[in-house]
């Protein structure tokens, strides 16, 4: 018998497809919630994305008691405390987070405070601190990439101490994730591309890193297939609702995959680059993915070769000799990046971003070595290794 | 039937083995920080007075080391003097045994959810690198290859033997001093 062992957990009800938003009132009533609060950001409100949610609730006689629309891109402990105060003052009983990663993480953190009590979110930081289920919590993602709607993690900045506080608990998972294509129809091309490549990276790393397991593999391969088949179509026709839904589902599936199998060096480098050079996360993922796969190649040849089926389809897969499939998978990812560069100039190298200096590479490499995700990279990474990947990604 | 009778003995032996390995590793961590500059480069990033613990949940065997400054680690044989800053916890004695008997690599144990990190994850990554370096030094190459993700290519036999001898000597001295005290 081998030592193989894995864990897989995802209790989030996924409500996806046409008119999915209209299920929110019913789902809330199923949890005895009558006074929901919406947590979102100004961009989402300005894009008119709250309107279908509010209309769906009003038509069912459900009043949205409060709307907080001022979540910043990097949410903080102060913002969380302020929202929790509004929640209590308005006697809300549930939360609907609408937005990208920041709004969703803020929703998770507010749910901790309003469920557990107190004003200091920092004291709930860490893993396994929460011991009880929280208030009803729904998530409506407006980007198709982060997968935050199905992850049990939230990160909030403590601006006084200048640190990022991580919160990890299965109780942070929402009761339901509502995936409605209307919510991503207006995403601009470069964000559509970067977030889809974020989902692609979640899926590829989930499938090739150390904690992969049969269940996360199933979600990861399905996500790779959906992104590969739909992304360029959506880039050419942004109003393609079916394609948008495919990308949104891919993001959720990739989120389920990586939250149960973790990610590797692409994320370590991406987190460090984001912290030092303030590049968007999805862009970093797209940028580093092929270079890291090349670095890991000999450790991941078999699973990476398998991915060719989902990246390029059965004809290409069967026509490619088994020994060349891993390289062909990397080529397919490069081809996709080239196509995205042609459509929206999504950078393929650090130099193309125009925001990274060559002199910053060493600092990025050093920081990446201490990132938690590096533990799950299939190959050991030294400082020199990280630097060589960065140099290859430079230009 | 025989297995049933032997089970308590096996459990007891496993616990004793894990306890002994923690004692050896704790002392060896102190020793490697004294003999290896690469290790000190890693541990210098820890705050002074930083307490690191490896423990079997809930109240099983544990090892505790403290960063006393300039990259030097000190093994606390009588428990932590105060609340620890970082704890890596095995969920069960069986999981600790798998890792400490080199049947499962530390990185695989993390991937398999055998262990939890309570504290700063980036420092846990750093301490894992130190543990890997220690295992690469003190274990025969064939065994070390089972314990670490990748055996360091630049670790050659003369350096390994010299360092291992110095680490083992320091561990033995520390054991003797503990018994005398």
Image (cartoon, rainbow, N blue to C red):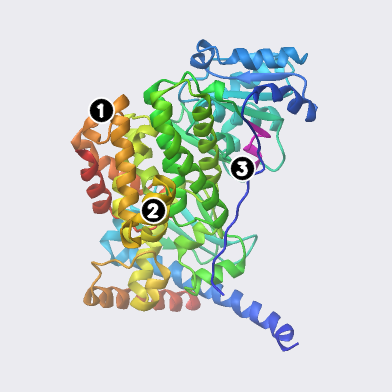
Q: Which residue is mark 2?
A: A317
Q: Which residue is mark 1?
A: A355
Relative to B130, say whether A143 is above or below: above
Residue in the image at 53% along x and 59% along y? B112
- Give the number of the mark in front: 1 or 2: 2
- Picture coordinates of residue A316 (x, y %)? 36, 50
Q: Can see residue A101? A: no
Q: Are marks 2 and 3 on the same chain?
A: yes
Q: Please report, as a chain letter, where disc 3 is located.
A: A
Q: Horizontally, is A318 left or right of B78 in the view?
A: left
Residue in the image at 72% along x and 38% along y? A133
Residue in the image at 24% along x and 41% along y? A393
User: For the magenta stretch, what is the residue range?
Assistant: A169-177
Relative to A40, say whether A287 is above or below: below
> Which element carries disc 1, helix, strand or loop?
loop
Q: Which of the 4 image quadrants contains residue A230?
A: top left
Residue B131 on the magenta segment: no
Relative to B28, say whether A230 is above or below: above
- Picture coordinates of residue B12 (x, y %)? 65, 78
Residue in the image at 37% along x and 38% along y? A285
Q: Horizontally, is B77 left or right of A116 in the view?
A: left
Residue A176 on the magenta segment: yes
Tags 1 and 2 touching, CB below 8 Å? no
Q: How many marks?
A: 3
Distance CA(mark 1)–CA(mark 2): 37 Å
Q: Please report, as a chain letter, where disc 2 is located.
A: A
If you read the primary sequence from the N terminus, does the residue marked by circle 1 or circle 2 appear first? 2
Q: Horizontally, is A85 left or right of A79 in the view?
A: right
Characterize the local packing of mark 3: few (<14), some (14-19) or many (20 or more) Cα atoms within 10 angstroms.
some
* Quadrant occupied by the N terminus of chain B: bottom right
Characterize the local packing of mark 1: few (<14), some (14-19) or many (20 or more) Cα atoms within 10 angstroms.
few
């Amino acid at each position: 018998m081998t030592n193989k062992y894995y864990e897989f957990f995802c209790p989030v009800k996924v409500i996806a497809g046409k008119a999915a938003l209209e299920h929110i009132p019913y789902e809330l009533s199923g949890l005895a919630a009558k006074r929901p609060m919406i947590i979102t950001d100004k961009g989402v409100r300005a894009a008119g994305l709250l309107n279908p949610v509010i209309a769906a609730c009003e038509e069912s006689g459900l009043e949205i008691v409060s709307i907080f629309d001022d979540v910043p891109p990097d949410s903080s402990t102060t913002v969380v405390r302020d929202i929790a105060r509004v929640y209590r003052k308005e006697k809300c009983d549930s939360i609907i987070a609408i937005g990208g990663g920041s709004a969703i993480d803020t929703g998770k953190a507010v749910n901790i405070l309003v469920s557990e009590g107190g004003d200091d979110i920092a004291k709930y930081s860490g893993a396994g601190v929460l011991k009880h289920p929280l208030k009803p919590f729904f998530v409506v993602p407006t980007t198709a990439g982060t997968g935050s709607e199905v992850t049990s993690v939230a990160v909030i900045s403590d601006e006084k101490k200048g640190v990022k506080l991580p919160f990890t608990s299965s109780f942070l998972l929402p009761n339901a994730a509502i995936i409605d294509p209307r919510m991503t129809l207006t995403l601009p091309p470069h964000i559509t591309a970067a977030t889809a490549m974020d989902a692609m990276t979640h899926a590829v790393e989930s499938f090739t890193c150390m904690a992969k397991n049969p269940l996360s593999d199933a979600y990861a391969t399905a996500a790779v297939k959906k992104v590969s088949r739909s992304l360029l179509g959506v880039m050419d026709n942004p109003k393609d609702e079916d394609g948008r839904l495919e990308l949104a589902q891919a993001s959720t599936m990739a989120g389920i995959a990586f939250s149960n199998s973790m990610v590797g060096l692409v994320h370590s480098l991406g987190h460090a680059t984001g912290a030092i050079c303030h590049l968007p996360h999805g862009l970093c993922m797209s940028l580093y993915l092929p270079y890291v796969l090349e670095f890991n190649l000999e450790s991941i040849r078999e699973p990476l070769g398998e991915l060719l089926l989902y990246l390029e389809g059965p004809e290409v897969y069967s026509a490619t000799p088994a020994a060349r499939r891993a390289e062909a998978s990397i080529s397919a990812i490069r081809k996709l990046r080239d196509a995205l560069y042609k459509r929206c100039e999504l950078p393929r190298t650090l130099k193309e971003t125009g925001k990274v200096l060559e002199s910053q590479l060493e600092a990025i490499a050093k920081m990446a070595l201490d990132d938690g995700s590096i533990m799950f990279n299939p190959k050991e990474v030294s400082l020199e290794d990280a630097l060589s990947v960065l140099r290859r990604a430079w230009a | 039937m025989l297995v049933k009778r032997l089970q308590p003995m096996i459990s007891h032996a496993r616990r004793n083995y894990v306890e002994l390995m923690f004692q050896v590793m704790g002392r060896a961590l102190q020793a490697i920080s004294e003999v290896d500059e690469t290790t000190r480069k890693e541990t210098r990033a820890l705050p002074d007075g930083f307490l690191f613990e490896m423990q079997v949940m809930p109240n099983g065997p544990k090892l505790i080391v403290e960063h006393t400054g300039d990259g030097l680690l000190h093994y606390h044989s009588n428990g932590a003097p105060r609340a620890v800053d970082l704890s890596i916890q095995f969920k069960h004695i069986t999981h600790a045994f798998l890792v400490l008997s080199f049947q499962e690599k530390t990185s695989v144990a993390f991937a398999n959810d055998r262990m939890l990190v309570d504290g700063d994850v980036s420092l846990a990554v750093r301490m894992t690198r130190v543990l890997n370096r220690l295992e690469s030094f003190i274990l025969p190459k064939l065994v070390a290859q089972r314990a670490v993700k990748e055996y360091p290519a630049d670790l050659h036999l003369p350096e390994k033997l010299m360092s291992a001898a110095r680490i083992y000597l320091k561990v033995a001295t520390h054991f003797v001093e503990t018994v005398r005290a």
